[in-house]
């Protein structure tokens, strides 16, 4: 995207927002263009002030290019970012190789202390596929032990390798993780596990009504 197009997109977002606007940087890997992000964030904040609107920023990254400079910039500018991490090493490396074909887990794990120190509200996003469905519990346990408290899981149902056996493994993983979730909740330490929290919230607002005839049919 050219800088001209990016500025026009920011102008449109500010014009369309009622009292605020949100700019989200994503790709591909947006940190390959960090210099542009720095320039566009300054531009968005200036234009937001002129319009009297609060600006919010989001960024999605695989984390491999994060360093202290970038993390400090995100902190200073209140950029909330989501980082792709599919769990423990076996779960992550099963589907996120580097360009050289090696696993990318260690590159992220080595930066976790720095990331959480400067940006403790980082959201970690895990994609569930048949390749890692059986490591859901161990992956959440790993992230918890590393100090991660904001976890979002997305099941890639479009993956063509799903079959009945894989879905049964996923079901068993959900059951195991549900037991962990109850214990973690009872510990009293605040955390966010999207796959359960979001559905509990939805049910609390409007309980789901199942069509039993459709199920039995």
Image (cartoon, grey):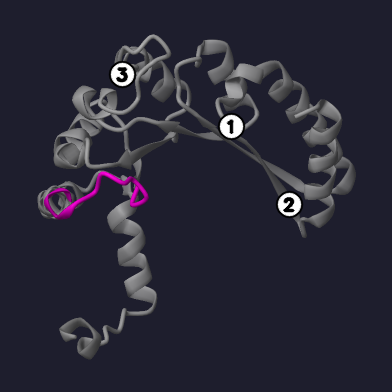
Looking at the image, is mark 3 or mark 2 earlier in the sequence? Answer: 2
> How many labels sit on residues?
3
Q: Which residue is mark 1?
A: 27
Q: Are marks 1 and 3 in contact (CB under 8 Å)?
A: no
User: Residue 158 colored magenta?
Assistant: yes
- Position of residue 166 measured from the top left corner of the image (x, y, whole percent): 16, 48
The residue depicted at 20 percent of the width and 87 percent of the height is: 212
Q: CA distance from mark 3 to mark 2?
A: 36 Å
Looking at the image, is mark 1 or mark 3 earlier in the sequence? Answer: 1
Taking 61 as reference, is 127 left or right? left
Q: Residues within 10 Å of mark 2 (few under 14, many from 20)?
A: some
The secondary structure type at the circle numbered 2 is strand
Q: Residues within 10 Å of mark 3 (few under 14, many from 20)?
A: many
Q: Is residue 201 above or below residue 142?
A: below
Disc number placed over residue 20 in the picture, else none: 2
Q: Residues within 10 Å of mark 1 (few under 14, many from 20)?
A: few
The residue depicted at 16 percent of the width and 85 percent of the height is: 216
Q: CA distance from mark 1 to mark 3?
A: 20 Å
Q: Residue lying farthest right? A: 50
Q: Which residue is mark 3?
A: 105
Q: Are marks 1 and 2 in contact (CB under 8 Å)?
A: no
The residue depicted at 60 percent of the width and 26 percent of the height is: 30
């Amino acid at each position: 995207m050219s800088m001209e197009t990016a500025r026009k997109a920011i102008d449109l977002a500010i014009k369309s927002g009622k009292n605020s606007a949100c700019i989200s940087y994503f790709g591909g890997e947006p940190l390959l263009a960090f210099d542009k992000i720095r320039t566009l964030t300054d531009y968005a904040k200036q234009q937001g002030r002129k319009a009297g609107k609060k600006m919010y920023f989001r960024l999605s990254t695989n984390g491999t290019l994060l360093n202290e400079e970038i993390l400090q910039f995100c902190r200073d500018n209140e950029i909330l970012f989501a980082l792709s991490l599919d769990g423990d090493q076996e779960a992550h490396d099963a589907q996120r190789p580097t360009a050289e074909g090696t696993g990318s887990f260690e590159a992220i794990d080595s930066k976790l202390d720095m990331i959480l120190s400067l940006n403790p509200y980082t959201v970690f996003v895990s994609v569930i596929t048949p390749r890692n469905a059986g490591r859901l519990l161990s992956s959440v346990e790993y992230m918890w032990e590393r100090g991660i408290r904001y976890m979002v899981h997305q099941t890639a149902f479009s993956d063509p390798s799903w079959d009945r056996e894989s879905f049964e493994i996923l079901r068993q993983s959900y059951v195991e993780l549900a037991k962990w979730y109850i214990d973690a909740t009872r510990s009293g330490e605040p955390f966010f596990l999207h796959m359960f929290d979001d559905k509990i919230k939805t049910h609390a607002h409007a309980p789901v009504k199942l069509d039993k005839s459709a199920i039995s049919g």
